[in-house]
Protein backbone atom coordinates (compact mmCIF):
# COMPACT_ATOMS: atom_id res chain seq x y z
CA UNK A 1 0.00 0.00 0.00
CA UNK A 2 1.26 3.41 -0.90
CA UNK A 3 1.81 6.02 1.79
CA UNK A 4 1.16 9.65 1.19
CA UNK A 5 4.84 10.38 1.66
CA UNK A 6 7.90 8.59 0.39
CA UNK A 7 10.38 10.70 2.31
CA UNK A 8 10.82 10.52 6.04
CA UNK A 9 9.33 13.52 7.76
CA UNK A 10 11.24 15.23 10.52
CA UNK A 11 8.10 16.66 11.95
CA UNK A 12 5.87 14.47 14.09
CA UNK A 13 2.33 13.64 13.07
CA UNK A 14 0.99 16.32 15.42
CA UNK A 15 2.67 19.09 13.41
CA UNK A 16 0.65 18.33 10.27
CA UNK A 17 -2.30 20.64 9.51
CA UNK A 18 -5.84 19.44 10.08
CA UNK A 19 -6.59 19.11 6.37
CA UNK A 20 -3.76 16.58 6.03
CA UNK A 21 -5.98 13.90 7.60
CA UNK A 22 -8.68 14.68 5.03
CA UNK A 23 -6.22 14.15 2.20
CA UNK A 24 -5.11 10.84 3.66
CA UNK A 25 -8.72 9.75 3.99
CA UNK A 26 -9.42 10.71 0.34
CA UNK A 27 -6.34 8.81 -0.74
CA UNK A 28 -7.37 5.68 1.16
CA UNK A 29 -10.88 5.77 -0.29
CA UNK A 30 -9.40 6.19 -3.77
CA UNK A 31 -7.12 3.18 -3.33
CA UNK A 32 -9.98 1.03 -2.02
CA UNK A 33 -12.23 2.13 -4.87
CA UNK A 34 -9.65 1.17 -7.51
CA UNK A 35 -9.02 -2.20 -5.85
CA UNK A 36 -12.73 -2.97 -6.19
CA UNK A 37 -12.76 -1.89 -9.84
CA UNK A 38 -9.69 -4.01 -10.56
CA UNK A 39 -11.43 -7.01 -9.00
CA UNK A 40 -14.46 -6.38 -11.25
CA UNK A 41 -12.23 -6.18 -14.33
CA UNK A 42 -10.52 -9.44 -13.45
CA UNK A 43 -13.83 -11.17 -12.78
CA UNK A 44 -15.26 -9.93 -16.08
CA UNK A 45 -12.21 -10.92 -18.11
CA UNK A 46 -11.62 -14.35 -16.59
CA UNK A 47 -15.27 -15.26 -17.15
CA UNK A 48 -15.45 -13.83 -20.67
CA UNK A 49 -12.19 -15.04 -22.21
CA UNK A 50 -12.98 -18.81 -22.30
CA UNK A 51 -16.53 -18.05 -23.44
CA UNK A 52 -15.28 -15.85 -26.30
CA UNK A 53 -12.79 -18.49 -27.41
CA UNK A 54 -15.52 -21.13 -27.50
CA UNK A 55 -17.91 -18.88 -29.44
CA UNK A 56 -15.21 -18.08 -32.02
CA UNK A 57 -14.44 -21.77 -32.47
CA UNK A 58 -18.07 -22.79 -32.85
CA UNK A 59 -19.23 -19.80 -34.94
CA UNK A 60 -19.57 -21.15 -38.48
CA UNK A 61 -20.43 -17.75 -39.93
CA UNK A 62 -17.65 -16.63 -42.29
CA UNK A 63 -17.63 -13.14 -40.72
CA UNK A 64 -17.97 -14.40 -37.14
CA UNK A 65 -20.82 -11.97 -36.41
CA UNK A 66 -22.01 -13.73 -33.26
CA UNK A 67 -18.52 -13.63 -31.82
CA UNK A 68 -18.03 -9.95 -32.61
CA UNK A 69 -21.35 -9.05 -31.05
CA UNK A 70 -20.40 -10.71 -27.75
CA UNK A 71 -16.84 -9.36 -28.03
CA UNK A 72 -18.12 -5.79 -28.41
CA UNK A 73 -20.35 -6.24 -25.38
CA UNK A 74 -17.47 -7.39 -23.18
CA UNK A 75 -15.29 -4.51 -24.34
CA UNK A 76 -18.13 -2.12 -23.60
CA UNK A 77 -18.33 -3.35 -20.01
CA UNK A 78 -14.56 -3.08 -19.61
CA UNK A 79 -14.53 0.47 -20.97
CA UNK A 80 -17.38 1.39 -18.62
CA UNK A 81 -15.26 0.33 -15.64
CA UNK A 82 -12.35 2.41 -16.89
CA UNK A 83 -14.57 5.44 -17.48
CA UNK A 84 -15.93 5.14 -13.95
CA UNK A 85 -12.37 5.27 -12.62
CA UNK A 86 -11.56 8.32 -14.74
CA UNK A 87 -14.66 10.22 -13.64
CA UNK A 88 -14.01 9.42 -9.97
CA UNK A 89 -10.39 10.49 -10.33
CA UNK A 90 -11.45 13.89 -11.69
CA UNK A 91 -14.08 14.38 -9.01
CA UNK A 92 -12.45 12.90 -5.90
CA UNK A 93 -8.77 13.56 -6.53
CA UNK A 94 -8.21 16.40 -8.98
CA UNK A 95 -11.06 18.55 -7.62
CA UNK A 96 -9.81 17.99 -4.06
CA UNK A 97 -6.27 18.86 -5.14
CA UNK A 98 -7.34 22.16 -6.72
CA UNK A 99 -9.52 22.97 -3.71
CA UNK A 100 -6.60 22.79 -1.28
CA UNK A 101 -4.11 24.21 -3.77
CA UNK A 102 -6.21 27.37 -3.98
CA UNK A 103 -6.46 27.65 -0.19
CA UNK A 104 -2.88 26.90 0.85
CA UNK A 105 -0.15 29.36 -0.05
CA UNK A 106 2.74 28.06 -2.12
CA UNK A 107 4.98 29.61 0.53
CA UNK A 108 3.57 27.34 3.19
CA UNK A 109 5.92 24.59 4.36
CA UNK A 110 2.99 22.18 4.02
CA UNK A 111 2.12 23.04 0.42
CA UNK A 112 4.13 20.08 -0.86
CA UNK A 113 1.70 17.75 0.94
CA UNK A 114 -0.93 18.71 -1.61
CA UNK A 115 1.33 17.86 -4.55
CA UNK A 116 2.33 14.61 -2.89
CA UNK A 117 -1.34 13.70 -2.54
CA UNK A 118 -2.00 14.29 -6.23
CA UNK A 119 1.17 12.50 -7.37
CA UNK A 120 0.56 9.37 -5.30
CA UNK A 121 -3.10 9.16 -6.33
CA UNK A 122 -2.16 9.78 -9.96
CA UNK A 123 0.42 7.01 -9.83
CA UNK A 124 -2.23 4.64 -8.44
CA UNK A 125 -4.51 5.66 -11.29
CA UNK A 126 -1.73 4.83 -13.76
CA UNK A 127 -1.39 1.39 -12.19
CA UNK A 128 -5.12 0.88 -12.62
CA UNK A 129 -4.79 1.82 -16.32
CA UNK A 130 -1.99 -0.72 -16.67
CA UNK A 131 -4.30 -3.43 -15.31
CA UNK A 132 -6.99 -2.26 -17.70
CA UNK A 133 -4.56 -2.48 -20.64
CA UNK A 134 -3.52 -5.96 -19.56
CA UNK A 135 -7.07 -7.32 -19.48
CA UNK A 136 -8.02 -5.45 -22.67
CA UNK A 137 -5.15 -7.14 -24.50
CA UNK A 138 -6.08 -10.54 -23.07
CA UNK A 139 -9.64 -10.10 -24.32
CA UNK A 140 -8.34 -8.80 -27.65
CA UNK A 141 -6.36 -12.01 -28.12
CA UNK A 142 -9.56 -14.07 -28.14
CA UNK A 143 -10.33 -12.85 -31.66
CA UNK A 144 -7.04 -14.21 -32.98
CA UNK A 145 -8.01 -17.19 -35.07
CA UNK A 146 -5.44 -19.84 -35.89
CA UNK A 147 -5.14 -18.80 -39.51
CA UNK A 148 -2.40 -21.33 -40.22
CA UNK A 149 -4.98 -24.07 -39.61
CA UNK A 150 -7.50 -22.40 -41.91
CA UNK A 151 -4.82 -21.89 -44.56
CA UNK A 152 -3.80 -25.54 -44.39
CA UNK A 153 -7.42 -26.58 -44.94
CA UNK A 154 -7.48 -24.45 -48.10
CA UNK A 155 -4.23 -26.02 -49.31
CA UNK A 156 -5.56 -29.52 -48.60
CA UNK A 157 -8.76 -28.79 -50.49
CA UNK A 158 -6.74 -27.48 -53.45
CA UNK A 159 -4.63 -30.65 -53.55
CA UNK A 160 -7.81 -32.73 -53.60
CA UNK A 161 -9.53 -30.89 -56.46
CA UNK A 162 -6.72 -29.56 -58.69
CA UNK A 163 -6.65 -32.67 -60.90
CA UNK A 164 -10.39 -33.41 -60.87
CA UNK A 165 -11.67 -30.65 -63.15
CA UNK A 166 -12.84 -31.75 -66.60
CA UNK A 167 -13.54 -29.89 -69.84
CA UNK A 168 -17.24 -29.40 -70.43
CA UNK A 169 -16.72 -29.86 -74.19
CA UNK A 170 -14.35 -32.82 -74.66
CA UNK A 171 -14.13 -34.19 -71.12
CA UNK A 172 -10.37 -33.82 -71.06
CA UNK A 173 -8.67 -33.42 -67.71
CA UNK A 174 -7.67 -29.84 -66.81
CA UNK A 175 -5.16 -29.32 -64.02
CA UNK A 176 -5.84 -26.28 -61.84
CA UNK A 177 -2.45 -24.58 -61.53
CA UNK A 178 -3.13 -22.36 -58.53
CA UNK A 179 -5.71 -21.33 -55.96
CA UNK A 180 -8.16 -18.95 -57.60
CA UNK A 181 -9.90 -16.32 -55.50
CA UNK A 182 -12.66 -15.52 -57.99
CA UNK A 183 -14.56 -17.21 -60.82
CA UNK A 184 -12.08 -17.78 -63.67
CA UNK A 185 -12.04 -18.95 -67.29
CA UNK A 186 -9.56 -21.80 -67.96
CA UNK A 187 -8.71 -23.05 -71.46
CA UNK A 188 -8.81 -26.77 -72.17
CA UNK A 189 -5.34 -27.90 -73.35
CA UNK A 190 -6.98 -30.34 -75.80
CA UNK A 191 -9.83 -28.48 -77.49
CA UNK A 192 -9.15 -24.89 -76.30
CA UNK A 193 -12.70 -24.53 -74.95
CA UNK A 194 -13.05 -21.88 -72.26
CA UNK A 195 -14.27 -23.51 -69.05
CA UNK A 196 -15.59 -21.62 -66.05
CA UNK A 197 -13.91 -22.62 -62.82
CA UNK A 198 -15.66 -21.46 -59.66
CA UNK A 199 -13.57 -21.66 -56.46
CA UNK A 200 -15.15 -22.98 -53.31
CA UNK A 201 -16.27 -20.74 -50.45
CA UNK A 202 -13.25 -21.90 -48.49
CA UNK A 203 -10.86 -20.98 -51.32
CA UNK A 204 -12.50 -17.56 -51.73
CA UNK A 205 -11.94 -17.00 -48.03
CA UNK A 206 -8.17 -17.01 -48.62
CA UNK A 207 -8.45 -13.39 -49.69
CA UNK A 208 -10.09 -12.56 -46.35
CA UNK A 209 -7.50 -14.28 -44.17
CA UNK A 210 -4.33 -13.64 -46.20
CA UNK A 211 -3.34 -10.37 -44.55
CA UNK A 212 -4.17 -11.64 -41.07
CA UNK A 213 -2.07 -14.74 -41.71
CA UNK A 214 0.83 -12.61 -42.92
CA UNK A 215 0.54 -10.44 -39.81
CA UNK A 216 0.56 -13.51 -37.56
CA UNK A 217 3.69 -14.80 -39.25
CA UNK A 218 5.51 -11.48 -38.73
CA UNK A 219 4.07 -10.61 -35.31
CA UNK A 220 7.52 -10.86 -33.67
CA UNK A 221 8.78 -8.03 -35.90
CA UNK A 222 5.78 -5.88 -35.04
CA UNK A 223 6.40 -6.47 -31.34
CA UNK A 224 9.98 -5.28 -31.76
CA UNK A 225 8.70 -2.09 -33.39
CA UNK A 226 6.04 -1.55 -30.71
CA UNK A 227 8.59 -2.03 -27.91
CA UNK A 228 10.91 0.57 -29.45
CA UNK A 229 8.04 2.94 -30.17
CA UNK A 230 6.74 2.74 -26.58
CA UNK A 231 10.26 3.15 -25.22
CA UNK A 232 10.32 6.75 -26.41
CA UNK A 233 7.30 7.66 -24.28
CA UNK A 234 8.60 5.74 -21.27
CA UNK A 235 11.96 7.50 -21.45
CA UNK A 236 10.24 10.86 -21.81
CA UNK A 237 8.22 10.30 -18.62
CA UNK A 238 11.29 9.11 -16.71
CA UNK A 239 13.17 12.22 -17.78
CA UNK A 240 10.21 14.43 -16.87
CA UNK A 241 10.04 12.94 -13.36
CA UNK A 242 13.73 13.64 -12.87
CA UNK A 243 13.18 17.19 -14.08
CA UNK A 244 10.47 17.70 -11.46
CA UNK A 245 12.76 16.36 -8.75
CA UNK A 246 15.16 19.24 -9.42
CA UNK A 247 12.64 21.88 -8.40
CA UNK A 248 13.12 21.53 -4.64
CA UNK A 249 16.74 20.34 -4.81
CA UNK A 250 19.52 22.77 -3.87
CA UNK A 251 22.52 20.44 -3.56
CA UNK A 252 24.70 21.04 -6.64
CA UNK A 253 26.16 17.54 -6.61
CA UNK A 254 22.70 15.99 -6.56
CA UNK A 255 21.56 18.37 -9.29
CA UNK A 256 24.53 17.38 -11.46
CA UNK A 257 23.74 13.68 -10.96
CA UNK A 258 20.12 14.26 -11.90
CA UNK A 259 21.13 16.21 -15.01
CA UNK A 260 23.54 13.46 -16.07
CA UNK A 261 20.73 10.89 -15.79
CA UNK A 262 18.42 13.19 -17.75
CA UNK A 263 21.00 13.59 -20.53
CA UNK A 264 21.47 9.83 -20.72
CA UNK A 265 17.71 9.23 -20.92
CA UNK A 266 17.39 11.89 -23.62
CA UNK A 267 20.14 10.20 -25.64
CA UNK A 268 18.28 6.89 -25.41
CA UNK A 269 15.01 8.60 -26.30
CA UNK A 270 16.45 10.20 -29.43
CA UNK A 271 17.83 6.83 -30.52
CA UNK A 272 14.39 5.24 -30.06
CA UNK A 273 12.77 8.05 -32.08
CA UNK A 274 15.12 7.33 -35.00
CA UNK A 275 15.11 3.54 -34.66
CA UNK A 276 11.35 2.92 -34.35
CA UNK A 277 10.52 3.95 -37.96
CA UNK A 278 13.29 1.64 -39.23
CA UNK A 279 11.84 -1.29 -37.32
CA UNK A 280 8.38 -0.38 -38.59
CA UNK A 281 9.60 -0.50 -42.19
CA UNK A 282 11.33 -3.86 -41.60
CA UNK A 283 8.05 -5.24 -40.26
CA UNK A 284 5.96 -3.88 -43.13
CA UNK A 285 8.30 -5.25 -45.80
CA UNK A 286 8.33 -8.71 -44.19
CA UNK A 287 4.55 -8.69 -43.72
CA UNK A 288 3.84 -7.72 -47.32
CA UNK A 289 6.33 -10.33 -48.57
CA UNK A 290 4.40 -13.01 -46.66
CA UNK A 291 1.10 -11.63 -47.94
CA UNK A 292 2.36 -11.81 -51.53
CA UNK A 293 3.47 -15.43 -51.03
CA UNK A 294 0.01 -16.40 -49.79
CA UNK A 295 -1.92 -14.58 -52.54
CA UNK A 296 0.44 -13.89 -55.49
CA UNK A 297 -2.44 -12.55 -57.60
CA UNK A 298 -2.78 -9.60 -55.22
CA UNK A 299 0.90 -8.63 -55.34
CA UNK A 300 0.48 -5.58 -57.57
CA UNK A 301 -2.33 -4.23 -55.39
CA UNK A 302 -0.43 -5.03 -52.19
CA UNK A 303 2.73 -3.28 -53.34
CA UNK A 304 0.76 -0.07 -53.95
CA UNK A 305 -0.58 -0.31 -50.40
CA UNK A 306 2.94 -0.86 -49.09
CA UNK A 307 4.28 2.22 -50.86
CA UNK A 308 1.38 4.29 -49.50
CA UNK A 309 2.10 3.15 -45.95
CA UNK A 310 5.77 4.06 -46.25
CA UNK A 311 4.74 7.69 -46.72
CA UNK A 312 3.34 7.77 -43.16
CA UNK A 313 6.37 6.27 -41.39
Image (cartoon, helix red, strand yellow):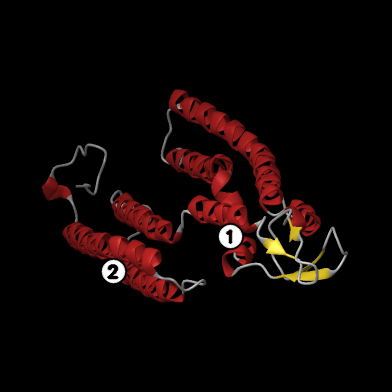
Q: Nearer the viewer, residue 255 or 123?
A: 123
Residue position for label 2: 92
Q: Place residue 38 in its image quadrant.
A: bottom left
Q: Is residue 8 visible?
A: yes
Q: Can you tell which of label 1 and label 2 is closer to the viewer?
A: 1
| Residue 209: mark | 1
Would residue 98 be visible to someone looking at this image? no
Q: Can you give x and y, in whole percent of width and height, for residue 300 in the image? A: 81, 56
Of the pair 176 and 124, the residue shown nearer to us: 176
Q: Which residue corresponds to the image point at 77% horizontal and 54% vertical from the top-left?
A: 299
- Name the secondary structure under disc 1: helix
Relative side of 243 to 28, left or right: right
Furthest residue in direction left, as rendered: 14
Where residue 180 appears, as percent x and y from the top left, is 70, 62
For label 2, the SS is: helix
Residue at 33%, 50% (x, y): give it.
112
Which residue lies at the image location 26% right of the left edge and 59% below the top edge? 46
- Pick out the residue farthest to the front: 170
* Placement of 275 over or under 204, stated as above or below: above
Measured along the vertical axis of the image, is residue 95 above or below residue 175? below
Q: Is residue 43 above or below residue 80?
A: above
Say left or right for 250 vs 160. left
Q: Circle 2: is it few (<14), some (14-19), or many (20+) Cα within 10 Å?
A: some
Query: Whole-percent x and y of residue 102?
Result: 37, 66
- Disc 1 or 2, which lies upstream in sequence? 2
Amino acid sequence: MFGLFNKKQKESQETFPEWHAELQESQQRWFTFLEKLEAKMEELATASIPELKQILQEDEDLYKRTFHKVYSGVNGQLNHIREKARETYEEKIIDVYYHYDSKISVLSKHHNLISDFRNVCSERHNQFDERYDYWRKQIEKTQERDLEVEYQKILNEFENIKDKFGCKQCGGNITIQKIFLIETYISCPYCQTQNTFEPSTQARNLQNISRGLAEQRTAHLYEEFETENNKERELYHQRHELSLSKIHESNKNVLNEIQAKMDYLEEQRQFAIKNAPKLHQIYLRAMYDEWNKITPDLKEHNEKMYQNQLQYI
